[in-house]
Amino acid sequence: MNIRLFFSVILLALLSQHVLAQTKDEKAILAVLRQEEKAWSSGDVEAYVELYAPLDSTRMILKKGAAMGKENILAFYKKYWPKEKMGTLTLDGEQLERISKKLYYVTGYFHVKYQDGKMQDGRYSSLMIKLRGQWYLYTDHSS
């Protein structure tokens, strides 16, 4: 066996072990992140905000405060992020940390590619909450 093949087999084994090690909840949270990418990238602000928890305490942290509750978060996005301004969203580098049975702390990177070819990259952090068996964004912050 050549050295390149050997390391490829080792890498594949490690990656598959990581995937298998994900819990049911972690897989569900990652699925929500993929839904975020899809909704944002298609310019569907309503579908994007549906991923936020249906609680008055749900918040999106902004430079000058926070938008609280889904209605206010939706109003913010509609005002400042029209469809033609949204671009294509990619999330990666996810780190999931279980806080309790119903809360996960999630961090990662975001990348938005705009129609003019420009890119915006940054970090995000979110609290995910499980309500009635479904995972939602509870607190969202990106910069």
Image (cartoon, rainbow, N blue to C red):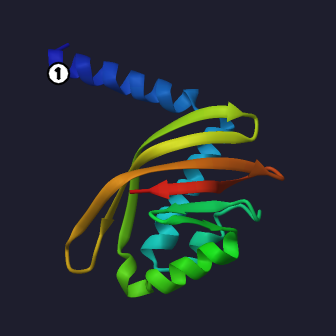
Quadrant where the N terminus sits is: top left
Q: Secondary structure at mark 1?
A: helix
In the displayed structure, would residue 74 be above or below residue 38? Answer: below
- Above or below for 55 versus 22: below
Task: Give the residue displayed 44% in from the left and 56% down from the top.
Answer: 142
Q: In which quadrant will I find the C terminus?
A: bottom left
Residue depicted at x 55% and y 49%: 126
Specify whether 11 is left or right of 55.
left
Find the residue positioned furthest to the front: 64
What's the amino acid at mark 1?
Arg
Q: Position of residue 72 (x, y in %)?
A: 64, 76
Residue 7 higher or lower than 121, as above or below: above
Query: Quarter-wise, where is residue 71 in the image?
Result: bottom right
Q: Position of residue 88 (x, y in %)?
A: 36, 70
Q: In the drawing, does residue 89 fall left or right of residue 70?
A: left
Q: Count neighbours of disc 1 (C-alpha within 10 A) and say few if under 14, some if 14 to 19, many if 20 or more.
A: few
For residue 36, side relative to residue 108 (left or right): right
Find residue 41 and report its image quarter: bottom left
Q: Which residue is mark 1?
A: 4
Q: Residue at x 66, y 55 (%)?
A: 138
